[in-house]
Image (spheres, coloured by chain):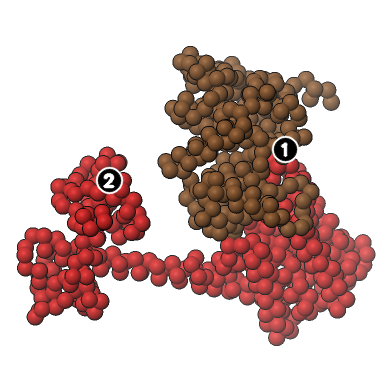
Chain colours: A brown, B red
C-alpha cells in the first residue's frame, strides 16, 4: 500500500522555485530518508506536504487522499531551531500540544490525552523530565520532546525535519531504536536527514533530491555512486539561472497564474 | 484610578503574547498609528467622549496593522522597516490633525494632546464602563482561545501542520493588540503605550516558567504600576499620567531584573562569586597534594606555599584560615597540612583534573602538553554524576597523559 505520493510537485521559497516537478511514491511501513545537499529543497518538501507552504503546482497524496483530509494521521516534527526554547512551558506542556485538535478549544484535556502524552514521553525516555522547563534541556532532549509531541498525535505517517542534527550519541541511539519500533508497528516515517554516511545505515528507502528528483526507491538502488555524484555535484547550471530569473522578474511559474 | 488599573491589567495580559512572539515593536506601531483615528473621530463628531474616540482609534490601529502586512508582503521591504514606516507616517498625520484642531474653532480646550501622554484626570466615570467592557472582551477571548494562542506563539508551523485555523488565530491576536492599545490612549497616551504592553511581560518572565502564571503576574504588575503612576501624577496639577505609569513600571522591571530568584542579576553575581571561591579553595588543595607527592613532610610553611604558587595579597592567609575552620587544613606550629578529610577532597580534585586530561587526550585527540589549562578550569565543574560517567567511559584508568597516577581510582570502583 502506498503511504505517500508526490506528483509533479513544484514549490517556491521566497519567490524562487526550489522544487521542480517532483514525482515519487513511498510504500507504507518504511523508514525513509530524504537526502540531498543544502538548499536542495528538502525542508521545503516537508513543509509543502504539511500544508505550511503552498505549492505552485502538482499535488501530494497521503494514503491516497488529500493531506488536508487526513491531517490527524500525519505527525510532524519541525526543525529544532525553528522555535525559541526560552518559551515558558514544561516538557509535558509541549507534549500535550500533540493532542490539540482543530475545534477542541475549551474543555480540559481528557485523562486519556494526558495518558497518551505520558506514554509518548516514556517512549522517548523523557518522562522523568516532564515538569522540567524546556529552556533547561539539552539539544538532544529538546529533539526528543518534539518527537514525543508527534507521537502523541498518534499518527500513521510521520514527517520529521532533521531530527538528528546536533544531538549527542545517546539521544541518537534512543531515537533510532524508537524509529525501528515504529516501523515494526507498521508506521511510515519520512525524514529529512542531513548526513549521507548514516543514511545507508538508518533507512530502508531513500529519496535523493537536488531541487529535482535524482532518484527514489530502496536504498541500495538509490545510493549508487552515479546518483550521488549527480545529486551532490552542484546545482544544474541552466536550471539555477532560470530560477534566479523567475525570482528577480517575478515571473509566474505555471500558466494558470498568467490568466489574470 | 480604577480605569487605569483596568487598562493596565488588560494591556499587560495581551502584551505577554506580543512579547513571546517577539512582536514588541508592532505594539508600538499600533499605538502610534492610533493618533489620526482619534483626531478624525473628534473632527467628525465634535465630541471628546471616549466612546466616540475609541472606535476611531480602533479603526486606525487596524489600518496600521494591515498597512504593515501589506507593505511587507507586496514589496521588498522587510517587516521591521514596514513597521517603522507605518508608525511614523500615521503618527505624523495624527500630529498634523491635532495641531489643526487645536488652532481652529473646534476648541482650544479640546485637550486632545492629552492623548499623547495620557491624562487620567480627564476620565469620566462613564468611561470606566468602556474599560470594563474592553477588559471583559480581552479576557474572554484570551481564555477561550488560550490553547491555540499558546501553541501558535510557541510553534506556528506545528499549529498550521495540525490544521489549526492559523489565519483566525492571527486575526484574534491582532484584534487583541489593537483593543488593548486603543483602550490605553486616555491613561498612558499614544507615545508610551508600548511600554505597558511589553514591560510587564518582560518583568514577569523573570519570575515564572508557566504561561498562565506569567499572564497573571504581568497583569498584576501592569495594574499596580498604573495605580501608583496615576496616584503620583495626581499630586501635582496638570501632570500627564503616562510618563509616571511608565516610570513606575520601569522601576519594577529593573528591580525584577536585579532581584529575580535564579535569573536575576544579584543571584547570578552571587553564584559567580561562590564559584570563584570554590576555585581558589580547590586550587590550594591541589597545591598541598602536589607538594605531598614530592616530599613526605605533610606540613608546609607559609613561605614555602608562597614560593610554589602565585597568590595575591592576603589571598593565601584568608584561604588558610577559612580552610582550617572547615577542618580541611590543620595547623602545626607555624605550618599547615591537610587533614584526612582535606586529603580526600584534594584527591578528588586532582583525580578530576587528570581524568579530564585523559578524556581530552583519548577522546578528543588533544596532545598531552595541551590539556593542562583546559583541565585547570573544568576540574572545578565536574559533578559526581559526571565523574562516574567519565570513569566508566575511560574504563577506570590508572594513569593520566603525563603518566602520573590518578588518585583514588580503586575506591571509586567499589
Query: In the picture, residue B159 is in which quadrant?
Result: top right
Of residues B115 and A234, the one drawn nearer to the viewer in this rendering: A234
Task: Identify the residue under disc 1.
Answer: A71
Which residue is drawn at the image coordinates 15% and 47% (left, top)?
B403
Q: Regarding mark 1 in the picture, which secondary structure is present there?
A: helix
Q: Is residue A103 above or below residue A213?
A: below
Q: Quadrant of the C terminus of chain B?
A: bottom left
Which residue is drawn at the image coordinates 62% and 33% (left, top)?
A187
| Coordinates of residue A237 in the picture (x, y in percent) | 55, 17
Of residues B308 and B92, the one drawn nearer to the viewer in this rendering: B308
Label 2: how many Cα within 10 Å (few below 14, some 14–19, many 20+): some
The subunit carrying tag 1 is A
Query: In the picture, residue B382 is in which quadrant?
Result: bottom left
Q: Regarding mark 2 in the picture, which secondary structure is present there?
A: helix
Q: Is residue B408 above or below residue B10?
A: above
> In this image, A209 relative to B38: left or right?
left
The subunit carrying tag 2 is B
Which residue is drawn at the image coordinates 22% and 48% (left, top)?
B397
Of residues B225 and B172, the one drawn nearer to the viewer in this rendering: B172
Q: Quadrant of the N terminus of chain B?
A: bottom right
Of residues B384 and A135, the one drawn nearer to the viewer in this rendering: B384
Q: Is residue A100 above or below residue A20?
A: below
Which residue is drawn at the image coordinates 80% and 22% (left, top)?
A256
Q: Mark 1–mark 2 contact, CB under 8 Å?
A: no
Label 1: how many Cα within 10 Å (few below 14, some 14–19, many 20+): many
| Coordinates of residue A166 in the picture (x, y in percent) | 46, 41
| Distance of label 1 from label 2 (alpha carbons) | 48 Å
Q: Is residue A122 above or below residue A252?
A: below
Residue most extreme to the right: B45
In the picture, the disc for residue B394 is 2
| Coordinates of residue B16 in the picture (x, y in percent) | 66, 61
Amino acid at each position: 500500500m502506498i503511504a505517500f505520493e508526490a506528483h509533479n510537485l513544484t514549490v517556491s521559497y521566497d519567490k524562487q522555485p526550489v522544487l521542480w516537478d517532483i514525482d515519487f511514491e513511498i510504500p507504507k511501513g518504511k523508514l525513509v530518508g530524504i537526502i540531498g545537499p543544502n538548499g536542495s529543497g528538502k525542508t521545503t518538501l516537508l513543509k509543502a506536504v504539511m500544508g505550511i507552504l503552498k505549492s505552485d503546482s502538482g499535488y501530494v497524496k497521503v494514503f491516497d487522499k488529500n493531506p488536508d483530509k487526513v491531517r490527524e494521521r500525519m505527525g510532524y516534527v519541525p526543525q529544532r531551531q525553528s522555535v525559541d526554547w526560552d518559551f515558558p512551558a514544561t516538557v509535558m506542556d509541549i507534549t500535550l500540544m500533540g493532542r490539540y485538535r482543530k475545534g477542541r478549544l475549551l474543555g480540559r484535556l481528557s485523562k486519556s490525552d494526558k495518558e497518551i502524552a505520558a506514554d509518548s514521553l516514556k517512549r522517548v525516555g523523557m518522562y522523568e523530565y516532564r515538569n522540567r522547563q524546556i529552556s533547561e534541556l539539552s539539544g538532544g532532549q529538546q529533539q526528543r520532546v518534539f518527537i514525543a509531541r508527534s507521537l502523541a498525535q498518534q499518527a500513521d505517517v510521520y514527517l520529521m525535519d532533521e531530527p538528528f542534527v546536533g544531538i549527542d550519541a545517546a539521544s541518537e541511539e534512543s531515537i533510532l531504536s524508537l524509529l525501528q519500533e515504529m516501523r515494526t508497528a507498521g508506521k511510515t516515517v519520512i525524514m529529512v536527514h542531513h548526513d549521507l554516511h548514516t543514511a545507508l545505515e538508518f533507512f530502508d528507502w531513500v529519496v535523493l533530491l537536488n531541487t529535482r528528483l535524482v532518484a527514489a526507491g530502496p536504498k541500495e538502488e538509490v545510493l549508487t555512486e552515479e546518483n550521488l555524484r549527480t545529486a551532490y555535484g552542484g546545482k544544474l547550471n541552466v536550471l539555477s539561472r532560470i530560477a534566479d530569473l523567475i525570482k528577480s522578474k517575478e515571473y509566474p511559474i505555471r500558466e494558470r497564474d498568467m490568466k489574470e | 484610578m480604577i480605569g487605569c488599573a483596568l487598562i493596565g491589567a488588560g494591556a499587560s495580559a495581551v502584551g505577554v503574547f506580543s512579547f513571546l512572539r517577539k512582536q514588541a515593536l508592532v505594539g508600538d506601531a499600533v499605538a502610534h498609528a492610533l493618533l489620526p483615528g482619534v483626531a478624525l473621530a473628534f473632527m467628525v463628531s465634535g465630541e471628546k467622549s471616549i466612546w466616540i474616540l475609541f472606535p476611531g482609534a480602533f479603526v486606525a490601529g487596524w489600518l496600521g496593522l494591515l498597512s504593515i502586512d501589506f507593505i511587507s508582503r507586496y514589496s521588498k521591504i522587510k517587516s521591521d522597516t514596514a513597521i517603522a514606516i507605518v508608525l511614523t507616517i500615521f503618527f505624523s498625520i495624527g500630529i498634523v490633525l491635532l495641531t489643526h484642531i487645536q488652532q481652529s474653532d473646534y476648541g482650544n480646550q479640546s485637550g486632545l494632546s492629552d492623548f499623547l501622554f495620557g491624562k487620567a484626570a480627564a476620565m469620566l466615570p462613564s468611561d470606566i464602563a468602556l474599560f470594563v467592557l474592553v477588559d471583559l472582551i480581552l479576557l474572554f477571548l484570551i481564555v477561550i482561545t488560550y490553547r491555540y494562542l499558546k501553541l501558535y506563539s510557541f510553534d506556528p508551523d506545528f499549529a498550521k501542520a495540525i490544521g489549526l485555523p492559523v489565519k483566525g488565530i492571527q486575526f484574534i491576536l491582532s484584534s487583541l493588540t489593537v483593543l488593548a492599545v486603543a483602550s490605553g490612549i486616555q491613561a498612558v497616551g499614544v507615545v508610551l503605550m508600548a511600554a505597558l504592553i511589553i514591560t510587564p511581560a518582560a518583568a514577569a518572565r523573570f519570575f515564572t516558567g508557566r504561561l498562565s502564571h506569567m499572564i497573571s503576574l504581568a497583569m498584576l504588575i501592569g495594574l499596580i504600576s498604573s495605580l501608583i503612576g496615576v496616584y503620583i501624577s495626581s499630586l501635582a496639577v496638570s501632570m500627564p499620567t503616562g510618563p509616571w505609569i511608565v516610570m513606575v513600571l520601569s522601576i519594577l522591571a529593573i528591580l525584577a531584573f536585579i532581584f529575580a530568584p535564579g535569573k536575576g542579576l544579584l543571584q547570578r553575581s552571587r553564584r559567580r562569586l561562590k564559584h570563584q571561591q570554590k576555585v581558589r579553595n580547590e586550587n590550594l588543595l591541589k597545591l598541598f597534594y602536589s607538594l605531598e607527592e614530592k616530599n613526605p613532610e605533610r606540613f608546609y610553611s607559609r613561605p614555602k606555599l608562597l614560593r610554589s604558587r602565585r597568590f595575591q595579597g592576603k589571598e593565601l592567609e584568608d584561604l588558610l584560615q577559612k580552610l582550617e575552620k572547615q577542618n580541611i587544613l590543620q595547623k602545626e606550629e607555624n605550618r599547615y597540612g591537610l587533614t584526612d578529610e582535606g586529603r580526600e577532597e584534594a584527591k578528588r580534585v586532582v583525580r578530576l583534573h587528570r581524568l579530564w586530561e585523559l578524556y581530552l587526550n583519548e577522546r578528543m585527540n588533544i596532545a598531552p602538553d595541551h590539556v593542562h589549562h583546559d583541565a585547570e578550569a573544568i576540574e572545578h565543574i565536574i559533578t559526581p554524576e559526571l565523574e562516574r560517567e567519565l570513569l566508566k567511559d575511560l574504563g577506570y584508568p590508572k594513569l593520566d597523559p603525563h603518566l602520573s597516577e590518578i588518585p583514588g581510582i580503586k575506591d571509586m570502583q567499589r
